[in-house]
Amino acid sequence: MPRSVLMLRKLAFAAGCLCIPVIVWLSLIPREWEVRTGLAGQIEHVIAYAGTGAVLALGLPRPAGWRLIASLTALAVALEVGQIWVPGRTSQVIDALASISGAGLGVLAGSALRRLLLRRMA
């Protein structure tokens, strides 16, 4: 495998690993600390989880599709439940579904890009 592809995968994996604590932080801070983008909350969820799923799928050394989607799903559900105890926050099923959808889309996109890169380098 060319060195440039290996470096890209390492950077993607590191970025994905950094995204997870950011998602946790943003999900569990009190309402008054939030800084919103102006987008609907569900769109923010889709974007955050899609980006995380994509860079992790791209960066993992082996394809992990369903396991990665399952892990991000567990994270999304745990964080939504955790919001029950955060002042000013509410737990909503629609938010969890948006996060899960984003994770699935991101993992699919990252996996497709990973396959494309590996084929081009073969």
Image: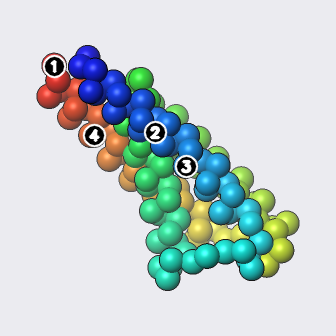
Dot 3 or dot 4: first in sequence order is: 3
Q: In this rendering, which labeled residue sits more in front, label 1 or label 4? A: 1
Cβ atoms at labels 2 and 3 below 8 Å apart: yes
- Give the position of the N terminus as an image quadrant: top left
Disc 3 versus disc 4: distance between alpha carbons?
Answer: 20 Å
State the colouring used for the structure image: rainbow
Cβ atoms at labels 3 and 4 below 8 Å apart: no
Q: Amino acid at mark 2?
A: Leu
Mark 4 residue element = helix
User: Where does label 2 land, which residue?
Assistant: 56
User: Where does label 4 land, which residue?
Assistant: 112
Disc 1 versus disc 3: distance between alpha carbons?
Answer: 30 Å
Residue 96 image position (x, y, % from top left):
60, 62
Q: Residues within 10 Å of mark 1 (few under 14, many from 20)?
A: few
The quadrant holding residue 116 is top left
Q: Amino acid at mark 4?
A: Ala
Dot 1 or dot 4: first in sequence order is: 4
Residue 25 image position (x, y, % from top left):
69, 58
Dot 1 or dot 3: first in sequence order is: 3
User: Where does label 1 land, which residue?
Assistant: 122
